[in-house]
Amino acid sequence: MNTILPVAIQKNPPKLILLDQTRIPETETYLALDTKESIFEAIKKLRVRGAPAIGIAAAYGLYVCLVQRSYADIDELRSEFQQLKSYFASSRPTAVNLFWALERMERRFVQEAAAKTKHIRNILESLYIESVTIFEEDQSMSRAIGEHALSLFDASRAWNIMTHCNAGGLATSGYGTALAPIYLGIERGYRMSVYANETRPLLQGSRLTAYELMKANIDVTVLCDSAASLVMREGLIDAVIVGADRIAANGDTANKIGTSNVAIIAKSFGIPFYVAAPTSTFDLKTATGKDIVIEVRDGEEVINGFGKRTGPVGAKVYNPAFDVTDHSYITAIITELGIISHPSTERVAEHMVKAFIKR
Ligand code: MRU
């Protein structure tokens, strides 16, 4: 099991603790942040990244920033809460878990502020509890996703699994999403190997996925993104599992740029393509993938990545950070509640009803 924790909270003095993922694989350096600007910067610059981890960091960050000063009354606290919430929400646009976590914190705030015994101290304490609950639920969600996903794999044979980007422990608080069945499977004696696409331009596959799997002694091979078709043709891949940043109501899935290429190639070779994500990654207000906002990042990441100039100064670059995989390419979406085979609007809705009943 992965032993790296990407995000944590320190209560006294209040700090958001983040593993600086921009420095992996060279070094595991933890940052202790307590200003809104440094927390915003850490999310924007991908020091913390991966949809669930971004949500946890924003919830913790909200508490850490709010608890450091005093307030004349609840209205002043409310106004500070709203400003911080909007500020953190503007850090990255695609991963819906960011908005989900901030809205969950807001619901808790409203609930607590309406209570008879409303005290600023109690409201702040309840926000702390809510943020820790988001973290703990994420841990159990990862495990449940792993359990459901593992039911798709037969223990009697070996499996070679391709993944894209990093949807492992570094992107969540626990086993990850796409990597959860691999961690669980290996624990239970399954024979599983991973092919990690390097994931241009920021190399989350080679820097992060290969790093955390090697740390857990799991067999991993790094591939250029453009090798996907060849390795599938060579019969080296049995299944693809990826994470998600946002899943629309019809099952269309936004994930790291390059994911849809893999899905299209997998379908043409008859290889199952699975998306593993918690129900907090579904955005039912978004009907189809066409309506998902795609983050466009600085072109320098493409032509001057990691400080190495690989394109002429001033070259025009288009650098979308995510793409959308049409639901027709997805064999199944695996959540903490079970499996949605061949996702469609009806099947997603049916599955999400279970999530609402549970809440
Ligand atoms: O830009 P990133 O590194 O935050 O992108 C992350 C991904 O695309 C992950 O696959 C996704 O967030 C799922 S993480 C469980």
Image (tube, rainbow, N blue to C red):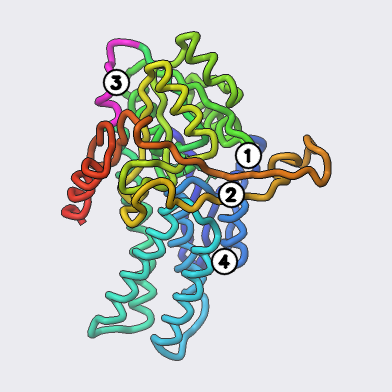
**What is the spatial separation of the Cα atoms under label 3 and label 4, in whole angstroms?**
44 Å
**Label 3 amino acid?**
Phe
Residue 158 horizontal side relative to residue 14, left or right? left
Residue at disc 2, secondary structure:
loop
Residue 280 horizontal side relative to residue 39, left or right? left
Say whether disc 4 or disc 1 marks the residue closer to the N-terminus: 4
Pick the front one: 258 or 268? 268
Q: How crowded is mark 3: few (under 14 residues within 10 Å), some or many (20 or more)?
A: some
Say whether disc 1 or disc 3 marks the residue closer to the N-terminus: 3
* Residue 155 magenta: yes
Say whether disc 4 or disc 2 marks the residue closer to the N-terminus: 4
Residue 34, disc: 4
Up/down of 327 relative to 190, above or below:
below
Does the Cβ of the disc 2 residue fall within 8 Å of ligand 1? yes
Q: Residues within 10 Å of mark 2 (few under 14, many from 20)?
A: some
Q: Residues within 10 Å of mark 1 (few under 14, many from 20)?
A: some
Q: What residue is drawn where x is 27% and y is 81%?
A: 114
**Label 1 amino acid?**
Leu
**Label 4 amino acid?**
Asp
